[in-house]
Structures are given as structure tokens and as C-alpha cells.
Image: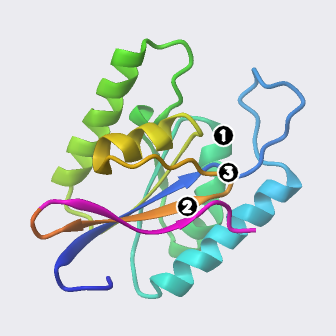
Amino acid sequence: MTDPAFNRVLLLARHAHRELHDRSNDNGLSGKGWEQARALTRYVLKKFPNAKWEFLSSPKARCRETLEPLSIQQGSEVRINPLLDEQEGQSEALFKMRIQKFLEEWKKSANPYTLACSHGDWIPEFVYLAIGQHQDLKKGGVIWLELTAQKSLVAVEVHQELL
């Protein structure tokens, strides 16, 4: 971590580029997406060379696959967390409640390093609810958030996309 006043890191990654044959399918990453997933791995290893990550993913294949290269390298599994799933017809109120629940659960967890992969509708809503800022990410983008000792969440870095 960058500062002793900070005690936990949450990296939010928007899933990498996916195959677009049929948007209704739970399809995986494209060739470009796999390149973005490897770029995410390089970024995380450069910024946090000694960290052992907890990997959380939306149930969608493109999110799981975005985390796969780093999780394999670390010998860790990617755990599915339905709270990270996209809105998909859910009411705005329920969607926001689900995001708030993820934030509350994450703040209570013990792991100092969490890498969560979600979607283009989920991440901006989370960032707004958590820190009051608007932040969109392109596919393959990442936002680095840290939880202070005073339990405030702050943005440290934003990369619209890593490639």
C-alpha cells in the first residue's frame, strides 16, 4: 500500500473486450480481451508486487476470464459474487441496494487486497455511491480505491483502459 494511513485496497476492473457475436450470450473474451487481461496482470504485479489478492467476479464469463491470468499466476481461485452482476432489467432501487451491499460486505472482509471485476453499468454506480464521483471505464479499465484507517474510501488511480 502507498501510505500507512491506508489499510485496504480495492481494484475494480471493467471486464475486458468480449466476443460480440450475440450480446445476449454470456460470451467470453475476444483476442483483444485476452491482451487486456494480461495487461491488467502486468499492471497489478507492477503496482503491488507482493500482494496476495482476493479475486471476485460477476457471474459473467467475460469477467471471470478478465481475472484469470492473474489468479492462475497467484494460484488463487476467482470467486463468483452475484452482487457484481450487471443490472439486466433489475429496478434502479434494487440495483443500488445490491451495490451498497457489496460495499458493506467488502468493508467487513479481512483481505487487504481485493480485485473485483464487473460491468460498465455497475462500476460507475459503485464509485458514485462509494466516493461521490462519476467515473466511467472503458472495457479493460481499472480504478484503484483505498480504504483509509478512518473507513473513508478514496480513489488513487484511474485508467480508462490498460491497452
Spot occupied by residue 36 in the image (x, y as percentages of width and height) = 73, 63
Up the image or down, 123 lies above or below 88; here it is below
Q: Amino acid at mark 3?
A: Lys
Q: CA distance from mark 3 to mark 2?
A: 9 Å
Q: Is residue 140 left or right of residue 23?
A: left
Q: Which residue is mark 1?
A: 61
Quote the CA–CA distance across marks 1 and 3.
Answer: 18 Å
Q: Are the residues flagged by discs 3 and 2 in contact, CB closer than 8 Å?
A: no
Q: Position of residue 22 (x, y in %)?
A: 85, 24
- Residue interval drawn in magenta: 151-163
Q: Residue at x 55, y 34 (%)?
A: 121
Q: Which label sits in the foreground, 1 or 3?
A: 3
Residue at horizontal 32%, vertical 82%? 1
Q: Is residue 43 above or below residue 143?
A: below
Q: Tell me the residue at 68%/43% (across/down).
A: 62
- Front-lying residue, 114 or 91: 91
- Please name whichever residue, 10 or 79, is drawn nearer the observer in this view of the structure: 10
Q: Which residue is mark 2?
A: 142
Q: Which mark is residue 138?
A: 3
Q: Is residue 144 left or right of residue 105?
A: right
Circle 3: is it few (<14), some (14-19), or many (20+) Cα within 10 Å? some
